[in-house]
Amino acid sequence: MESTRIRLTLGAITAAVFAVGTVFLGASAANAQGVTGPGFYVDGVQYRTVGTSTDFSGTGAPDSTFQPIYAFPAGTQPNVATAAPGDPDYRGGRWQVYAVSLPNGYDAALASGDLDGDDVLDSDEELWAAVTAGDLVVGGIVASFECPVIPVPASS
């Protein structure tokens, strides 16, 4: 009985890691590890990462050791993080993923949050402008993990 619970728990954790990899990296489960294409924005700059299989969910690590990243629904836009290497509050690539929803649709969130007019929500300031307008809702933490952050070359 105990081994069945352990197998079920491990299966659920594995499924959650693949699901978060898909949300966070915009990649399929088969591509969950390795260097990704553009995956998220920080202050208007696109970054990519190297997918890892780390999972800090349920470890008791303090929230203050993680950086928030906001996972947009698939097919809308890359995710938004709050810091990158070189920022004073960057926490070394330890992430807590918050799922966001768009109750009035992506176009409404873009209309209320795109402060610089570049047709994407690409900073946490823009994300919170859409939240304040009621066009974007930040949900709870769906995953906690670690992965490195790499700027996307300007030619990409």
Image (cartoon, grey):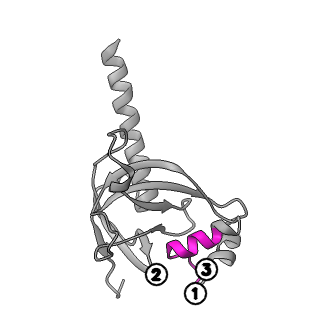
Q: Is residue 17 magenta?
A: no
User: Callout 3: helix, strand or loop?
Assistant: loop
Look at 54% across and 75% down and name the residue there. Answer: 125
Q: Which residue is mark 2?
A: 44
Report the span colored magenta.
118-130
Q: Is residue 126 magenta?
A: yes
In the rendered structure, the answer to whether residue 127 lies left or right of residue 38 reads right
User: Callout 1: helix, strand or loop?
Assistant: loop
Q: Estimate how packed mark 2 is, as few (under 14), some (14 to 19) or many (20 or more) residues with alpha carbons within 10 Å.
A: some
Q: Amino acid at mark 3?
A: Asp
Q: Estimate how packed mark 1 is, as few (under 14), some (14 to 19) or many (20 or more) residues with alpha carbons within 10 Å.
A: few
In the rendered structure, the answer to whether residue 65 lies left or right of residue 132 reads left
Image x and y of residue 112, in percent: 68, 76
**Residue 46 in which image quadrant:** bottom left
Q: Which residue is mark 1?
A: 116
Q: Which residue is mark 3?
A: 114
Look at 36% across and 74% down and name the residue there. Answer: 47
Q: Residue furthest top?
A: 1
Of pointers 3 and 2, the one earlier in the residue sequence = 2
Query: Which quadrant holds the C terminus?
Result: bottom left
Closer to the camera, 13 or 57? Answer: 57
Q: What is the distance, in whole Å, between disc 1 and disc 3 at their CAs?
A: 6 Å
Q: Are marks 1 and 3 in contact (CB under 8 Å)?
A: yes
Q: Amino acid at mark 1?
A: Asp
Q: Are marks 1 and 2 in contact (CB under 8 Å)?
A: yes
Image x and y of residue 32, in percent: 33, 54
In the rendered structure, the answer to whether residue 23 lies left or right of residue 133 reads left
Closer to the camera, 86 or 155? Answer: 86
